[in-house]
Image: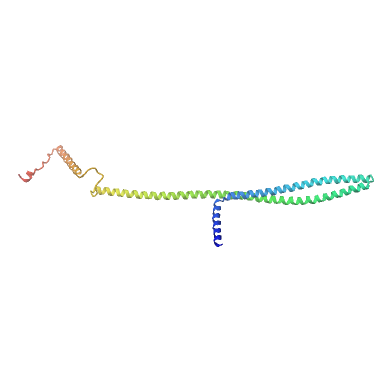
Amino acid sequence: MGLLTRMETVFKSKMNKVLNKMEDPRETLDYSYEKQLELLQNVKRGIAEVTTSKKRLQLQRAKLLQSNEKLEKQARDAVAADREDLARMALERKAALQQQVDGIDREIAELEKQEEKLIASEKRLSTKVEIFRTKKESIKAQYSAAEAQVKINESVTGISEEMADVGLALERAENKTEEMKARAEAIDELMEAGTLEDLTGSKDDIERELAKISAQTSVESELARLKAEAGKEPEKEETEEEKKGV
């Protein structure tokens, strides 16, 4: 029994969460308002039925009173004609009809009381329904505003989280870029110092030496040209024999 009770409790809690997610308070309020309107309509229908019954009894009472007036006249005519027996018969019928009229009067009075109670109930209920309607619309408006605010806040939160991720990505990119710049500068310095060979170059060692000789020759040629323009004789280089004093 303990296990079954626990399973029942868990099931009810799960269902309660599902129902809470599915339930829309605005729909619940509208449904309650519709039910109150139905109740109010039932009360109004009851008033109409009581009023109809009262009107029917009043019409029946009016017919009985007409019959009584007719019997009263017949009794008078019978007395004038010295027909006491007919006068007595008319008066007996009149008395019976009067009893019916008295009964109808009691029923009409009872219906009037019911009618008054129903009308008072209808007025109180109408006031309550109108108050509920106003409050319902106010709550619905507040709920809609709160719902919109929640959606906005969720959107802002999502954007903030996304921007935070973008910020981290930018920071990582900047750090990586700075690291690559530092490595590039370090490699340039090593290549300029000759510590690191430029493996991407197309020249080998011989070509680099020939390039240096060509550059030196070009410099000497330019220097000789400048001296000639200045009227200075270019210095003759000593041969190996002169250097030996031969």
Judge from the rendering whether residue 168 lies leftward or rightward of residue 116; answer left or right: left
Nearest the viewer among 134 and 227 is: 134
Residue at image position (92%, 45%) is: 78
Task: Indicate the quadrant containing the N terminus: top left, top right, bottom left or bottom right.
Answer: bottom right
Give residue 100's position: percent from left, percent from top: 83, 49
Residue at image position (72%, 48%) is: 47
Give residue 161's position: percent from left, percent from top: 44, 50
Choose top left, top right, bottom left or bottom right for residue 2.
bottom right
Residue at image position (69%, 49%) is: 42
How did the renderer colour the structure?
A: rainbow
Judge from the rendering whether residue 200 lies leftward or rightward of residue 147; answer left or right: left
Give residue 36's position: percent from left, percent from top: 65, 50
Residue at image position (47%, 49%) is: 156
Nearest the viewer among 73 and 157 is: 73
Choose top left, top right, bottom left or bottom right for residue 200.
top left
Q: Is residue 89 visible?
A: yes
Task: Indicate the quadrant containing the C terminus: top left, top right, bottom left or bottom right.
Answer: top left
Judge from the rendering whether residue 93 lies leftward or rightward of residue 174; answer left or right: right
Number of marks in the image? 0
Give residue 194's position: percent from left, percent from top: 23, 48
- Furthest residue in direction right, as rendered: 82
- Furthest residue in direction bottom, as rendered: 2
Q: Is residue 126 visible?
A: no
Nearest the viewer among 211 and 86 is: 86
